[in-house]
Amino acid sequence: MRSPQSLRNGETPSPHPRIPPHHFHSTVSAQKLRRFNTVILVFRLAAFCFSLAASVFMLTNSRGSNSPHWYDFDAFRFVVVANAIVAVYSLFEMGASVWEISKGATVFPEILQVWFDFSHDQVFAYLLLSADAAGTALARTLRRTETCTAENAFCVQSDIAIALGYGGFLFLGFSSLLSGFRVVCFIINGSRFHI
């Protein structure tokens, strides 16, 4: 229905109602987009699992009152916090990916979602890498002291937590590559995927 304002401006009413344009996507393009989003979801799930496991392994790394604790070392605290942050972020991004797969639309407006994903993937990947590098340096230093000879289980569990953190970084890095691809597609085509 035409508004009275448009009729007053000299427009003649059309006998055919105006149909809003719909974006046409072929079935193949929709399947490609769904597959691409599923790959991102798998990488985010893996980053979540590895980061959560790294946090849990480091948090449970205490053997008793006489043994060292993870919170006695700044680098190990950094490992716990960074992995916990990445786990929470990955959980949020998994929800956003499921939303996008099921609804076919992003949670935020498309331009904001594309840049949000890419920038946060980059920041949290580097945060995780720096935390794991600091944890690795401390673990190597502890190997040369009596801490690891007297409490070998503490050092082994710390090494496992750090290795899991590197796994989380690896999968977050893969997610970052894919979100970078989405940014480039958005800049070139105006869409988050080259359809």
Image: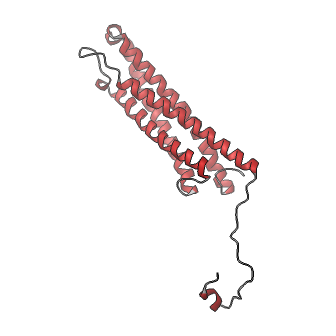
Screen quadrant of the N terminus: bottom right
Q: Residue at x 30, y 16 (%)?
A: 63
17 versus 5 height, above or below: above
Looking at this view, name the residue that lies furthest to the top. Answer: 149
1 versus 63 height, above or below: below
Using the rendered view, name the quadrant where residue 16 is placed: bottom right
Horizontal side of residue 154 vs 185, given as left or right: left
164 versus 30 height, above or below: above
Asked whether 28 or 89 is in front, the reply is 28
Q: Residue at x 53, y 47 (%)?
A: 96
Looking at this view, name the residue that lies furthest to the left. Answer: 65
Indicate the position of residue 161 as horizontal and vertical percent values.
Answer: 43, 23
Indicate the position of residue 155 as horizontal and vertical percent values.
Answer: 38, 15
How are the residues colored? secondary structure
Indicate the position of residue 154 as horizontal and vertical percent values.
Answer: 36, 15
Q: Residue at x 37, y 12 (%)?
A: 153
Indicate the position of residue 127 as horizontal and vertical percent values.
Answer: 45, 36
Using the rendered view, name the quadrant where residue 159 is placed: top left
Q: Residue at x 45, y 36 (%)?
A: 87
- Total numbered labels: 0
Asked whether 66 or 92 is in front, the reply is 92
